[in-house]
């Protein structure tokens, strides 16, 4: 059954139909949006964008970001009671690895029990100097099969969210997860798995050094900030060593509850402002 167009389709269509307007799009995004034929219009220009609410007036980044909650101290968070089952203990040096060593180490990692059931280590993807980073929870079945993050239905939605923001997923955004191997049955990662594996992620954040980070769902919020309640905390800036961090809802959750797409679009518009990107105008009454 064909998917119903959502707010992100509407925004993308609006961008395509208003290519002469200044939306601060990168060359890559313009190429992606305007070099391919427009899809069959799902909505009319008169009602685009339908549900994008007016974003609040931009606040200077420095004042919009509350005092940083203490970033979880990584070594202390590693449960000492759960030593890696394999003889190789890569984590002592992870914090100082260069990109290639980090990736090579992760791809061979047997640090936790998830190594026994995975098909792939999903290291993350995107340019190593991406300005925007998305952090999710962990690979699902599709990601485990393909070895790439966010390639299933939730990934397709994330890609449209990124495009609606005026970014090109392949060339401008880095995507990673708290854990790099699939938890069986798509369960949440266990604390010993997440706290161990996230050391790779913390080094990835350091190496990418993005201008902003978007957290997708409850799991990264908990394992990076020890905070619970993403539905209450979404849309409120956090700080990670000077990098503004926007928690929002996971695309898989949006698939289950599409009404949440509009508030998530508000969160993403706040992120766009960090990059000087102008969100498309709200629907005229
Ligand atoms: S989930 Fe992370 S720590 Fe566990 S085996 Fe995979 S890469 Fe290693």
Image (tube, rainbow, N blue to C red):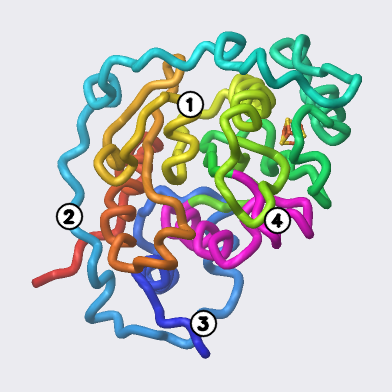
Q: Residue furthest right?
A: 87
Q: Nearer the viewer, residue 222 or 26?
A: 222
Q: Which residue is mark 2?
A: 54
- What segment carries the magenta color? 138-166
- Confirm whether the magenta stretch covers residue 272: no
Q: Which mark is residue 59?
A: none
* Local crowd size for mark 1, using a 10 Å CA cut-off: few (<14), some (14–19), many (≥20): many
Which mark lies nearer to you, 2 or 4?
A: 4
Residue 174 visible here: no
Residue ID at (68%, 32%): 128
Residue 49: x percent and y percent?
Answer: 27, 70
Instruction: Kindly identify which residue carries mark 3.
Output: 39
| Chief secondary structure of the magenta portion | helix
Nearest the camera: 89 or 224?
89
User: Mark 1 falls on what kind of element?
Assistant: helix
Q: Determine which residue is flagged by label 1.
A: 224
The secondary structure type at the circle numbered 3 is loop
Name which residue lies at 60% across and 25% down: 195
């Amino acid at each position: 059954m064909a998917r119903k167009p959502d707010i992100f389709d509407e925004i993308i269509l609006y961008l395509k139909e208003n290519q002469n307007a200044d939306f601060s799009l990168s060359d890559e995004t313009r190429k992606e949006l305007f070099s391919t034929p427009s899809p069959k219009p799902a909505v009319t220009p008169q009602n685009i964008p339908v549900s994008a609410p007016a974003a609040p007036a931009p606040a200077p980044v420095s004042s919009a970001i509350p005092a940083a909650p203490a970033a979880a101290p990584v070594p202390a968070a590693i449960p000492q009671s759960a030593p890696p089952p394999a003889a190789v203990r890569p984590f002592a040096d992870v914090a100082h690895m260069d990109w290639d060593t980090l990736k090579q180490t992760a791809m061979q990692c047997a640090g936790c029990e998830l190594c026994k059931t995975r098909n792939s280590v999903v290291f993350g993807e995107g340019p190593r100097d991406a300005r925007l980073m998305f952090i999710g929870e962990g690979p699902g079945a599709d990601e485990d099969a393909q070895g790439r993050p966010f390639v299933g239905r939730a990934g397709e939605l994330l890609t449209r969210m990124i495009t609606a923001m005026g970014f090109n997923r392949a060339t401008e955004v880095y995507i990673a997860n708290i854990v790099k191997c699939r938890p069986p049955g798509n369960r949440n990662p266990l604390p010993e798995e997440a706290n161990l594996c996230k050391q790779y992620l913390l080094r990835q954040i350091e190496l990418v050094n993005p201008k902003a980070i978007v957290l997708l769902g409850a799991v990264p919020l908990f394992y990076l900030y020890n905070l619970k309640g993403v539905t209450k905390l979404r849309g409120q800036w956090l700080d990670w060593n000077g990098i503004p961090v926007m928690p929002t809802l996971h695309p898989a959750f949006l698939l289950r509850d599409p009404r949440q797409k509009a508030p998530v679009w508000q969160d993403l518009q706040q992120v766009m402002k960090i990059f000087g990107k102008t969100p498309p105008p709200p629907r005229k009454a």
